[in-house]
Amino acid sequence: MTLEYNGHPSKGHWNVALWLDNDETLYRLCQWYLKEFGRKEAARRIANLWKGERTPDGFLFTYSRVYHALDNE
């Protein structure tokens, strides 16, 4: 996988990671999910929780984007 946008595969991946890492409530939620379920299941649950939802910048919270963002946690 080539990391082409600020160390992420795409602008969408970067933007979702930005929000998950920098919004305190989202960050704490992600940390809890990671601790309870591990990365793969945490990403699945978070993506399902926000299915169809977008970041304030307009990017969808997809499984791929959430999974990639959780890699850096």
Image: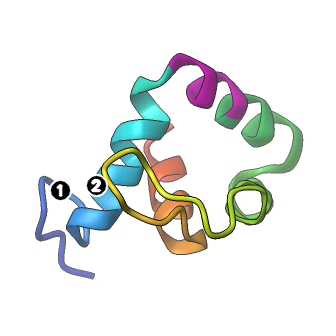
Residue 23 percent coordinates (x, y): 47, 24
Q: Residue at x 69, y 67 (%)?
A: 51
Give whichever of 5, 36 is nearer the camera: 5
**Which element type, helix, strand or loop, lies under badge 1?**
loop
Q: Residue at x 62, y 21 (%)?
A: 25
| Res 51 label | none
Instruction: Give the residues in magenta.
Output: 24-29
Dot 2 amino acid type: Trp
Q: Residues within 10 Å of mark 2 (few under 14, many from 20)?
A: many
Residue 40 percent coordinates (x, y): 71, 64
Residue for badge 2: 14
Residue for badge 1: 7
Give whichever of 4, 16 is nearer the camera: 16
Dot 1 amino acid type: Gly
From the viewer's perspective, is the residue at label 1 or at label 2 nearer?
A: 2
**Which element type, helix, strand or loop, lies under badge 2?**
helix
Check the picture and name the quadrant holding the N terminus: bottom left
Task: Kindly check if marks 1 and 2 are in contact, taking CB atoms under 8 A apart as contact.
Answer: yes
Asked if the stretch drawn in magenta spans residue 68, the answer is no
Residue 36 percent coordinates (x, y): 88, 39
59 to the left or right of 45: left
**Residue lying farthest bottom?**
1
**Residue lying farthest right?**
36
Asked if the stretch drawn in magenta spans residue 27, the answer is yes
Vertical relation: 63 (above or below) 31? below
Vertical relation: 55 (above or below) 11? above
Residue 26 percent coordinates (x, y): 60, 31
Q: Earlier in the sequence, mark 1 or mark 2?
A: 1
